[in-house]
Amino acid sequence: QVQLVESGGGLVQPGGSLRLSCAASGNIFRLSTMKWYRQAPGKQRELVGIITGGGITDYADSMEGRFTISRDNAENTAYLQINSLKPEDTAVYYCNLENLLDGVDAWGQGTQVTVSS
């Protein structure tokens, strides 16, 4: 059973930056695709972007530019760097681990990001 633990959220002023972390248990992390989603109040969960086990990234069109996903396979951790934060980035951010070979689709508990002055 894979468990994901997000951290790094908090209250930040507009224009600031945050780096969110997603630590995974188990031994399939390096072979898994990691995805970051976010859900703003009253809105549906939306995809921010993904990173494959080999480090290839892809982002939702609306997320290009200010969001950067990375991973450290030795640490079983994925990261989401968000720059130039805007109030509309306020949301709960979730990480997701997908491993189709092993049939694993795991979610973290989410970390709250609030952008406000």
Image (tube, rainbow, N blue to C red):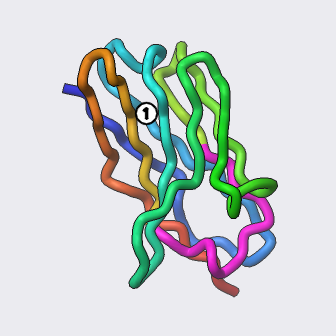
Give the image location of residue 4, x and y in percent.
34, 38
Rendered residue at 50%/29% (across/down): 77
Give the image location of residue 20, x and y in percent.
56, 49
Quadrant of the drawing holding the N terminus:
top left
- Tally of numbered tags: 1
Q: Is residue 63 left or right of residue 43?
A: right
> Considering only vertical position in the picture, is 70 above or below 76?
below
Give the image location of residue 102, x and y in percent.
26, 17
> Considering only vertical position in the picture, is 69 above or below 74?
below
Task: Residue 17: name its quadrant.
Answer: bottom right
Most extreme residue toward the left, as rendered? Answer: 1
Residue density around tag 1, few if under 14, some if 14–19, many if 20 or more, within 10 Å: some
Residue 67 lies in the magenta stretch: no
Give the image location of residue 110, x and y in percent.
38, 56
> Considering only vertical position in the picture, is 22 above or below 12?
above
Q: Secondary structure at mark 1?
A: strand
The kind of residue tagged 1 is: Ala
- The answer to which of 104 and 111 lies nearer the viewer is 104
Task: Residue 13: name its quadrant.
Answer: bottom right
Residue 88 lies in the magenta stretch: yes
Rendered residue at 77%/57% (across/down): 66
Quadrant of the drawing holding the C terminus:
bottom right
Residue bounds of the magenta highlight? 80-91
Rendered residue at 56%/75% (across/down): 90
- The answer to which of 99 and 70 lies nearer the viewer is 99
Task: Residue 64: name its quadrant.
Answer: bottom right
Residue behind mark 1: 23
- The answer to which of 99 and 26 lies nearer the viewer is 99
Rendered residue at 40%/41% (across/down): 96
Q: Is residue 92 left or right of residue 88?
A: left
Q: Is residue 53 left or right of residue 24?
A: right
